């Protein structure tokens, strides 16, 4: 299907499931495209269910871009149905399988935490969009090139900032396993109290196991995630304190959602800069 014969005043409507996807697409694409985001700031994508309003937004879209690998676990059926009548593209489908993290037989969906990997996914999605709307991508060439340069600069910035933390203190403990790609890309050990999806819960064994690790390694700080209630990390804090250990909350990290638009962490790059600066200051 080639849709480049659309009238010039016709906007191409793109609906992205998460803010991380919507922001990178909006940063790349010419104003001929309108990018809308389904999930509001701070929303947990693992638990998100499409509302009636979402379904009509999706039905009016020309292109739907989602993360894939079951990040949008409760939207699977809706996306599957739409794929028979809409252009539906997954960020994860743009990557070779061997680059995906696999834990207990399931692929880790939190791809955006490796900037280089996310950039490759973005470029793959833009290539898919070009097949259907070549004029849009041609008009966006300069924007795409400028934004990709910013992403490469971000990747180098994250790398050099994490490298400031002494190697033995590079242990990142968060509420759920969202930072696996981050750890792999930027050489920091990552531990999540809950599993890869926030649907899984944690038990006393998990608290004791991670509490032991904190005490043995003198970990200074653990981190709360913005889109998850802080009770899990508070339970871990109490566990360590009750055994005479000393650990604090090092700050709030954005894991599976951006902040509100027009705030610093309302963009993919701003969110990353906030996280990396928070981690470096707390662990250094
Ligand atoms: Zn997650």
Image (cartoon, grey):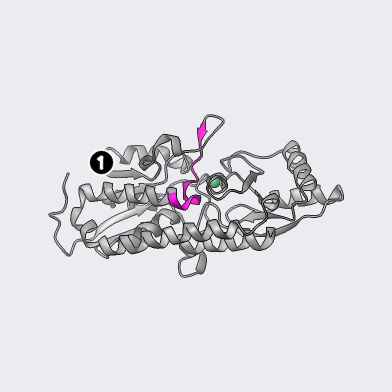
Residue 195 magenta:
no
Residue 112 magenta:
yes
Going 58% across and 60% down the picture, which residue do you hit? 161
Q: Quadrant of the C terminus?
A: bottom right
Report the front residue among 26 and 140.
140
Q: Quadrant of the N terminus?
A: top left
Q: Secondary structure at mark 1?
A: loop
Q: Which residue is outermost to the bottom?
A: 262
Q: Position of residue 120 (x, y in %)?
A: 38, 48
Q: Which residue is mark 1?
A: 85
Q: Position of residue 201 (x, y in %)?
A: 65, 39
Report the front residue among 108 and 98.
98
Does 125 sit left or right of 207 as displayed? left
Magenta part of the chain? 106-116
Q: Position of residue 118 (x, y in %)?
A: 42, 50
Going 61% across and 49% down the picture, which residue do you hit? 188
- Dot 1 beta carbon under 8 Å from ligand 1: no
Report the front residue among 249 and 100.
100
Going 58% across and 48% down the picture, which residue do you hit? 187
Q: Position of residue 261 (x, y in %)?
A: 45, 66
Viewer can see residue 192: yes
Q: Is residue 88 above or below residue 276?
A: above
Going 79% across and 45% down the picture, which residue do you hit? 216
Does 240 sit left or right of 137 as displayed? right
Viewer can see residue 259: no
Quadrant of res 152: bottom left
Report the front residue among 13 and 98.
98
Q: Is residue 119 above or below residue 82?
A: below
């Amino acid at each position: 299907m080639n849709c480049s014969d659309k009238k010039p005043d016709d906007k191409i409507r793109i609906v992205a499931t998460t803010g991380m996807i919507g922001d990178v697409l909006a940063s790349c694409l010419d104003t001929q495209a309108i990018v809308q985001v389904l999930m509001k700031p701070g929303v947990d994508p693992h638990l998100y269910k499409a509302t009636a309003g979402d379904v009509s937004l999706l039905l009016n879209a020309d292109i739907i871009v989602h993360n894939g690998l079951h990040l949008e676990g409760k939207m699977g059926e809706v996306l599957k149905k739409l794929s028979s009548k809409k252009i539906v593209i997954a960020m994860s489908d743009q990557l070779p399988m061997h680059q995906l993290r696999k834990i207990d037989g399931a692929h880790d969906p939190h791809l955006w935490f490796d900037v280089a990997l996310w950039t490759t996914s973005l470029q793959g999605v833009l290539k898919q969009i070009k097949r259907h709307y070549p004029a849009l991508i041609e008009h966006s060439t300069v924007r795409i090139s400028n934004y990709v340069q910013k992403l490469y600069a971000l990747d180098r910035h994250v790398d050099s900032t994490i490298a400031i933390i002494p190697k033995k203190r590079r242990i990142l403990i968060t509420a759920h396993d969202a930072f696996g790609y981050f750890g792999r890309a930027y050489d920091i050990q990552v531990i999540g109290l809950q599993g890869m999806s926030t649907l899984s819960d944690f038990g006393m064994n998990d608290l004791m196991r991670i509490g032991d690790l904190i005490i043995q390694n003198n970990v200074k700080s653990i981190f709360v995630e913005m889109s998850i209630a802080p009770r899990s990390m508070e339970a871990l804090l109490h566990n360590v304190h009750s055994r005479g250990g000393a650990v604090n909350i090092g700050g709030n990290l954005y894991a599976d959602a951006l902040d509100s638009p027009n705030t610093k962490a309302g963009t993919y790059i701003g969110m990353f800069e906030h996280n990396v600066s928070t981690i470096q200051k707390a662990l250094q």
